[in-house]
Every structure is written in C-alpha cells, then in structure tokens.
Image: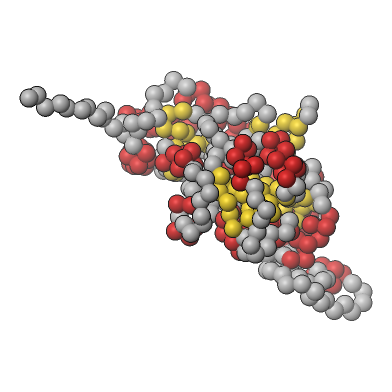
Amino acid sequence: MIPIAKPCLGLLEAKAAEQVIASGWVSQGPQVAGFEADFAAFTGAKHACAVSNCTSALHLALLGVGVRPGDEVITVSHSFIAGANTVRQCGGMPVFVDIEAGGYNVDPDQLAAAVSRRTRAILVVHQMGMPCDMRAIMQVANHERIAVVEDAACAVGSEIQFGSGWRRIGRPMGDVVCFSFHPRKVITTGEGGMLTTDNVVLDDKFRLWRQHGMSVSDTSRHASAQVIFEDYPVQGYNYRMTDMQAAIGREQLKRLPDIVRRRRELANRYRLALQDMDGARPPAEPVWARSNWQSYCVRLEDGIDQVALMQAMLDQGVASRRGIMNMHQEDAQRDVPLAFPLPRSEAARDRSVLLPLYAQMTDEEHDTVLSVFSDALKTARQPARINLVQAV
C-alpha cells in the first residue's frame, strides 16, 4: 500500500527523545525553550511559543487578539473543523466566506463584504501549505482595523514574496501564526503546535495561558536558589508541549529544508505528468508563493466520479483522500448561519482528490501512483447522458 502521507522520522529523533528520558526532565522545559528559539530563528518571527497542538494554538491566538462572546471571526468553511471549533470555544461565531476561483484559499475580494460591527478578527488558512494572498488580506484588515490570525497548520517551510525578497510563513504579516506538528504535516512531533508573533504582549499571554495561568514557570522555580511560590492571576489551560516532543521537533526542523526540497520535486513531477492527462487538473502555484506541498490536491473534471476513482485506486494499493472538508456541511457547525453562498468551497470538496506525497517517496512509487491514477480516471468516467426523444 502506498499511503497518502508518511512522517519522516529516524534514528536522530529516537536518540533525541532517549536523551530527554535519560535527563529526567520530560515535561515542558529546556528542550521546549530550545525548540522555540530554533523555530523563531527559522521563520524570522520575534517570538515562538510551543503548545500541545495547533487547535490549542488557534484557541490561544483568537483569545489573544480579543475574540470574546458575541464577536465574529471571518474565515473559510473550506478547512479542518478546528478553525470553527476554536472560534466558538471563545464564544465567537464564524462568518464563512468562499474560496478563490481555481484555488483552495480564501477569496480576499469577499472579505470586506463580511465585515460587521461585531467583527473581531480574520482567520485565514494557508491551505495544504499554499500561502494565502496576504497582501490583499492585510489591505482589508488594516483598512477595517481587524486582527489577523494565520492558520499555518500545513505551511511550515512555505514562502511568500515580500518586496524584492521571500519570507517564510511564520514571520507574521498579521498578528499571530499557528502551526501543527501532527503526523500528517511536513514535520511532526507526534502532536504539537506553535504560535509565532512579533508582539511581545501576545507572546507573554500565550506563555501564561498555556500553563494554567501560572505566574512562575517550572524551569524558573527549579532553577531558583530561593523558595518561590507561584500564583495564578488568570484562568489558564494545560496546553504544554513535552520536552520529548520538543527534542524530536528540533531534529525535524533540521531536516525541514531537505524535506521541502523533495516535496517540491515530487509536486513538479505530478504537475508535468498531469498536464497531458485527461480528466484532472493540477493545482496552481501563484508566482508570489512557494508551497511546501503538504498535500497535492487534483481537481477532477466533469464526468469523473470522485468516489469511484478513489475506490479504484485503493483496489490497486494506492491511498487517496477526498478534497478538503467544509465546516458548514458538518453537523457540528450546521447551526452557523450562512451569510454568503459557498459554491466554490462545496465544489472543491466534491470535485478534488488528494494524491500521495511524502519526502521518502521514491520515483518508482510516484510513477506507480500516476499509473494507477491514470487508469482510475478511465474507469471512473461516467457515461455521458443521452436525451432520448421518443418518436411519435
């Protein structure tokens, strides 16, 4: 079976975790601090705060920019359900807008119409590693004086053109950027997340909230030569990352440039092959963006049965996934009132398929996927409907 994804882990990560276990300090501690410093340096952000997962990162980010009960957060439905869940956990309500034509990210042209007096923030998603049009998004946000949170769960290692140069996703163009280290992502710590920001006040809040609102960290208390008693000035959460996870993350971060380089090679192989393949269209990469290709999403042409295609591939030992979910089509978020129609989002879910892509994938495996996909397109093609007119 060729899987849809595979974490790129090895002996270096195992050794790093072993050393943490041998040290006796396995919870949030020196390795977490090291991972945060490494990650901030990699992205170019002033501050990085490690947490238990990207969902907790999104929750803290939204709280940090002031989302409270009764507020609205403009976002896309076309994303993992954690986005809407965290808005509602803050007491806010998501306002869904549609994605761009021909892509999978938010359509910036729809943002201004969604702004109301209750709008507190815009939550944008760098879907599948492809950067959003942050220039256009920030124009709206700055004009309306609205905070911007970037959901970069999939986008570590992706880049966006800024001026005459390039900057990595994670150096905030808005207020906060949130990352995931789930096994499906480009680098992993098993679970885990990170918030990056250039705002020291926000960073201080994140560090306080992630550890129950504790005024003195474990590391500070243990390092002190005098007795220290912590207090709890605010309500907080248990959103800590362990030192074992962080040690693995530091090794993964060293691998990241090579991982992204290989993923880009494989994405280009897909692009070249799909150009001459009937029934499917490769994703487009804007000239101002460099994706890490966390997922490779192919749009199916009319007449191709999505489920039949995926089953035909699975029967030949190749995994695939349906296009990205829409939150408004899930029971958990069906009560969110829709202010705008979302035809592009709905079409993207039902008319696209994710193909296998991971850094360890060999050219031979890649060729197998392409061969199986090509055959599946033929078997999944629905016969054209013929209107029969009965002779009188």
Residue situated in front as seen by the camera: 68 or 229: 68
Q: In the rendered picture of this protein, how many numbered marks are placed on residues?
A: 0
Q: Residue furthest left?
A: 392
Q: Residue at x 40, y 30 (%)?
A: 301
Question: The N terminus lies in which quarter of the figure?
Answer: top left
Q: Residue at x 78, y 62 (%)?
A: 205
Residue situated in front as seen by the camera: 258 or 94: 94
Q: Specify the quadrant of the image occupied by residue 91.
A: bottom right
Q: Residue at x 34, y 37 (%)?
A: 305
Q: Position of residue 104 (x, y in %)?
A: 54, 38
Q: Left or right of 223: which side holds 270?
A: left
Q: Position of residue 333 (x, y in %)?
A: 49, 57
Q: Left or right of 256: which side holds 274?
A: left
Q: Position of residue 117 (x, y in %)?
A: 68, 53
Q: Is residue 53 above or below residue 74?
A: below
Q: Specify the quadrant of the image occupied by residue 233.
A: bottom right
Q: Is residue 207 above or below residue 184?
A: below
Q: Left or right of 312: which side holds 178?
A: right
Question: The C terminus lies in which quarter of the figure?
Answer: top left
Q: Specify the quadrant of the image occupied by residue 204.
A: bottom right
Q: Residue furthest right?
A: 225
Residue 275 in sight:
yes
Q: Position of residue 102 (x, y in %)?
A: 52, 31
Colour mode of the rendering: secondary structure
Q: Is residue 69 above or below residue 186?
A: below
Q: Residue furthest front?
A: 117
Q: Residue at x 73, y 59 (%)?
A: 66
Residue 371 in sight:
no
Residue situated in front as seen by the camera: 210 or 65: 65
Residue situated in front as seen by the camera: 116 or 277: 116
